[in-house]
Image: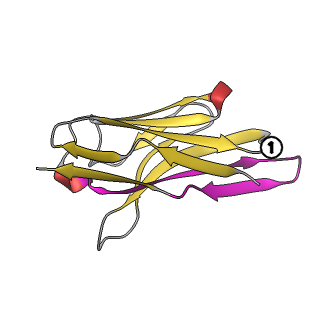
Amino acid sequence: QVHLVESGGGLVQAEGSLRLSCVASGSIVSLNATAWYRRAPGKQRELVAVIKSGGDTNYADSVKGRFTISRDAAKNTVYLQMNSLKPEDTAVYYCNAGGRTGIWQTFDSWGQGTQVTVSS
């Protein structure tokens, strides 16, 4: 079983910055893509950014140029650096990761979420 724990959320003023962290623990053999999602009040969950096993990244149009996803493979940690934050970035941010825990065993795990609130 693989557990994901997010941290780094909080309250910040518009144009401020936050860095979210997602630490994966468990018997991880390999990681595939790791992604950040968010869910704002009254809205559907939205894919924010993804980093693939080869290092390729993709971003939602709404965060391109402001957010950066990165990872530290040695620490099984993925980060989301968020700059120039806007009130519309307010949401609960979730980490999602998939991969293998064995030759035949796969996992697809979610963290508990971390609240990001941006004030105007």
Magenta span: 89-112
Please state if 78 lies on the left or on the right of 10 as rendered.
right
* Up/down of 91 relative to 51, above or below: below
Question: Is residue 90 on the magenta stretch?
Answer: yes
Instruction: Provide residue 2's location: percent of width, then percent of height.
Output: 72, 51
Q: Residues within 10 Å of mark 1 (few under 14, many from 20)?
A: few
Question: What residue lies at 35% left-to-right and 49% top-to-bottom?
Answer: 60
* Residue type of the residue flagged with mark 1: Ser
Please state if 55 lies on the left or on the right of 99 as rendered.
left
Under circle 1, the secondary element is loop
Q: Quadrant of the N terminus?
A: bottom right
Question: Is residue 102 on the magenta stretch?
Answer: yes
Q: In this orientation, which residue lies closer to the viewer: 117 or 60? A: 117
Instruction: Provide residue 104's location: percent of width, then percent of height.
Output: 88, 53
Q: Main secondary structure of the magenta part?
A: strand
Quarter of the image where one finds residue 82: top left
Question: What residue lies at 61% left-to-right and 31% top-to-bottom?
Answer: 54
Q: Which color mode does the image show?
A: secondary structure
Number of disc labels: 1
Question: What residue lies at 29% left-to-right and 69% top-to-bottom?
Answer: 41
Quarter of the image where one finds residue 26: top right
Q: In this orientation, which residue lies closer to the viewer: 59 or 13? A: 13
Residue labelled with disc 1: 27
